[in-house]
Image (spheres, rainbow, N blue to C red):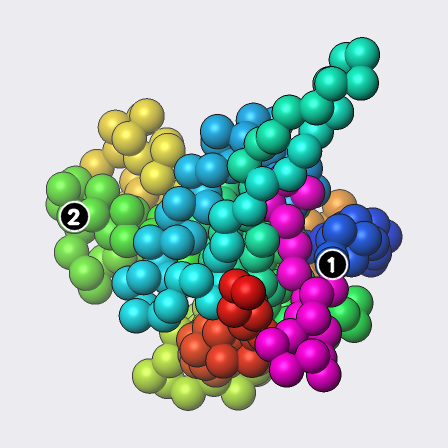
């Protein structure tokens, strides 16, 4: 079992995806004839997003259209149904349906795609960033991965809290179990020690300031505890504490084999700031995206 940090892509993968998405962009003339509007065609986008079947991709398009409507944004400004001819055997041709899409439309399609697919994760940042600079795309991919890791840790800790409440452990007991697990993961440093070390206020969760790798490590240990609490039918604070400490030791040992000590990693940006940044970006994307020219 290993620690999976979702979509922490290497630079080579980012450049390969960027090249693929850049290559299918098309430019058409704006209404005033003075500007070029960047557009993508759905049939091309389907391929680079890794969808084998048009019908499945059409589902993502339809969800994106509904998302656009729900925000009271004019769908026709960003999605336009068109037709294209494809070549068949013996020189024959057939007309098929396609869509012309703005950057914002592509962003919504990516947001409504399968986030487990690496191509989708890349596209979500590629279309959100109003530039083709690879380093800015990479930066966004990394902080979105950190937000997703933090969400998974919240979910696994909530599940653990519910599991152990049914097994005779109250909220204070859950806090003690988590803290003892932290002390093992961080080489003897308690949660409070790590907060002081990283400059975290007492009223804020430590995990909000941990780097993605450490968040993923804490989540793996918590998931293992959840699994074994149920699988071994553990009951009471002592038994569950021992289990959680053992799981954190296993994760720490695994990191140690790669020369990583969690307590020595620097603090990361406050997760709340990242959440506000992503929310702000979402509002700005539609405003900054060019609109499709009116039909002549």
The residue shown at (20%, 47%) is 162
Evaluate whether residue 249 shows in this view: no
Q: Residue furthest top?
A: 90
| Side of 17 where 142 appears, left or right | left
The residue shown at (32%, 26%) is 232
How many labels were placed on the picture?
A: 2
Q: How far apart are marks 1 and 2 (CA)?
A: 57 Å
Evaluate whether residue 68 shows in this view: yes
- Which residue is under mark 1? 26
- Asked whether the beta carbons under mark 1 and mark 2 sit within 8 Å of each other, the answer is no
Asked if the magenta segment contains residue 97, the reply would be no
Please report whichever mark, 1 or 2, sits nearer to the chain's N-terminal start.
Answer: 1
Write down the quadrant of residue 292 in the picture: bottom right
Is 282 drawn above or below residue 107 in the view shown?
below
Q: In which quarter of the image is the C terminus?
A: bottom right
Labelled disc at residue 165: 2
Labelled disc at residue 135: none
| Side of 80 where 263 appears, left or right | right
Circle 2 SS class: helix
Q: What stretch is highlighted in magenta?
A: 27-44
Q: From the top left corner, tell me how far across and down residue 210 is, in percent.
A: 55, 70
| Side of 35 where 234 appears, left or right | left
């Amino acid at each position: 079992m290993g620690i999976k940090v979702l979509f922490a892509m290497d630079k080579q993968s980012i450049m390969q995806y960027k090249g693929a998405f850049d290559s299918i962009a098309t430019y058409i003339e704006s209404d005033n004839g003075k500007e070029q509007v960047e557009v993508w065609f759905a049939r091309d986008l389907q391929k680079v997003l890794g969808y084998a079947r048009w019908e499945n991709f059409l589902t993502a398009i339809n969800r994106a259209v509904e998302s656009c409507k729900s925000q009271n944004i004019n769908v026709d400004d960003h999605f336009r149904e068109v037709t294209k001819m494809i070549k068949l055997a013996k020189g024959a041709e057939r007309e098929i349906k396609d869509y012309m899409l703005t950057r914002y439309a592509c962003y919504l399609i990516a947001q409504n795609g399968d986030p487990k697919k690496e191509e989708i994760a890349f596209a979500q940042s590629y279309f959100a960033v109003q530039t083709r600079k690879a380093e800015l795309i990479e930066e966004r991919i990394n902080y979105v991965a950190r937000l997703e890791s933090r969400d998974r840790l919240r979910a696994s800790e909530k599940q653990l809290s519910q599991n152990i409440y049914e097994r005779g452990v109250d909220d204070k007991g859950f806090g003690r179990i988590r803290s003892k697990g932290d002390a093992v993961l961080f080489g003897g440093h308690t949660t409070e020690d790590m907060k002081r070390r990283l400059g975290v206020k007492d009223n804020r969760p430590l995990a909000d300031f941990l780097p993605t790798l450490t968040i993923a490590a804490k989540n793996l240990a918590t998931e293992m505890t959840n699994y074994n609490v149920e699988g071994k039918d553990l009951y009471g604070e002592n038994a569950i504490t021992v289990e959680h400490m053992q799981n954190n030791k296993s994760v720490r040992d695994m990191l140690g084999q790669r020369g990583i000590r969690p307590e020595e990693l620097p603090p990361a940006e406050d997760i709340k700031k990242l959440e506000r940044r992503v929310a702000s970006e979402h509002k700005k994307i539609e405003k900054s995206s060019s609109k499709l020219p009116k039909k002549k």
